Image (tube, rainbow, N blue to C red):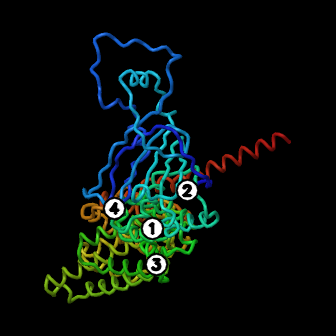
Amino acid sequence: MGDVRLNRVDQGQTKIKNVPIAVTPEGFWCCPSPVVFQKSHKPQNPLNKTKPSSSPPQPQPKASVQKKPVAVQVTERRCSTPALAPASSRLVISDDQNCGVGSERSSAGTSLAAERLSSRPKIETMPRKVAIEFGEPGTCDMKVVLLGKQGFSVKLSVHRDVLIEKSSFFSEKISEQSDLSCLQIGDCEDVEIYVEAVGLMYCKEMKQRLMKQNVSRILRILKVAEFLGFSSCIQSCLEYLEAVPWVGDEEEEKVVSTVRQLQGEGIGVNPVLKRVSSDVSNVPKDTFSQIIELVLKSNEEKGRREMKSIVLKLLRENNSLPSYARSTDICNDMIYTSCRSCLDLLLSLFKQAAESSFVCKPSDERDSVTKRIALEADNLSWLLDILIDKQAADEFALLWANQQELAVLHAKLPIVSRYHVSCISGKLYVGIGRGELLPSKDTRQMLLQTWLQPLMNDYNWLQHGCRSFDRKLVEEGIGRTILTLPLEDQQSILLSWVGIFLKTGDSCPNLQRAFEVWWRRTFIRPYVENQGNVVSDSSTSSMK
């Protein structure tokens, strides 16, 4: 935080100007930022200004120009409470290098002002020195000098007993040297906040004072209070951070990282950190299971759709992190438990809809079953999206391929009731075609044998009745899945497809690309390879 030096104060002879400043009801100065000092660092003319004469002023010889003290007025910052407490503060600015505080006002005429203007150095190179007195004037018994960067320094006139009571840092330094009259802290990164922290030592209602600040400034105060061992200020800052909302991820990260640095020093920061962490074990897993269950059981279409989108987006963000940085490791077994539950319910609904007496039931009851089938199919499709993003969908492909009973019942239901189920098969084919899941050869073969024909039967309805259905994507996925099988299996499936395609045309998936690849593999590749072998043999024999 800074270097600490102990000095005795010597009274300087520099002429300085006292500037009245805003005082809070608690009796301490509201310190403006160093930027304010820089912006307002301008030479001031005397109070009694004379009108400029018509003739231009005569230039002064360079030898006669002498460097004079520069008095600077700081823009006053008024507090929200207009009433001033009996205690006061004084701000003194000087360009002298001594540690003393003076009170004599400088006076000069118009010619002196012209000298100052002509010989004024650049603002960046001018030394900046501020002196502040806390409490009743003339009662201070100690000086604290804060040396900031770029030559900015502040001298505080303070009370020894206040520092000892409020700050373990000051208490320790003063106890080491009982007659200490001046303590210097060098290389202060945040002089403005040091001044405010000392001012807070004189404040009775610290909470009300901190309420006027923002989170960023409170974190700066907390950092300085930690260095000074200002425990009551630390506690007030933590109470503020625990209660105030944090705006945005960046501010939250700043708060959490700053507060966690205090955690190792035995400071009670748990109330703040409880906002981002929990002491209860298995909270992420149990909470995620509860969220999944709530979404799957929802009957409100708009809310369910939006929550599925939100949860899927957040899970994708979590999956994009490195494995060591993920906040939660959500168990795949729990997701698969939900998948099996949805499948069981879907099979039960299919059995109910496949009964011969189902068509005789009231239309409301039939519509209810149809809606529940669509809901469970949509739930399974959403769970499959989650598993694909987690690269854990291979088991789902096997689970779906083994649903032969469901596939048999599928043919007995009206298309309007069943076509949602074919969307799941299409999504699996797309995933396999993209390499997003890698089920075994037997699983891929069984998946095509069980669900390709039902998908073809629903294809015309899928194109016109399902918004999310992408024909080209599904056709490419089916073709690529077929081409992963042995050549004999490719031939069996594609020849069957040719017969269907010639009868139904656009009402059947167009697997032309897969058919062309199979054709080349079957009729062209063997010939090319055979010709290559013949050429190789002939060249070998000629060499002999």
Q: Identify the residue shown where x is 54% and y is 72%.
A: 263
Q: Which residue carries the number 2 mark?
A: 522
**In this rendering, the label closer to the viewer, 4 or 2:** 4
Indicate which disc residue 165 carries.
none
Q: Which residue carries the number 1 mark?
A: 233
Quadrant containing the N terminus in the rendered view: bottom right
Q: Identify the residue shown where x is 50% and y is 34%.
A: 126
Who comes first in sequence, dot 1 or dot 3?
1
The three-letter code of the residue at mark 3 reads Ser
- Which quarter of the picture shows residue 367? bottom left
Q: Could you tell me if residue 472 is visible in this image?
A: yes
How many tags in the picture?
4
The three-letter code of the residue at mark 4 reads Cys
Q: Which residue carries the number 4 mark?
A: 508
Who comes first in sequence, dot 1 or dot 2?
1
Give the Cα separation between the discs numbered 3 and 4. 54 Å
Establish if 265 lies above or below 209: below
**In this rendering, the label closer to the viewer, 3 or 2:** 3
Give the Cα separation between the discs numbered 3 and 2. 62 Å
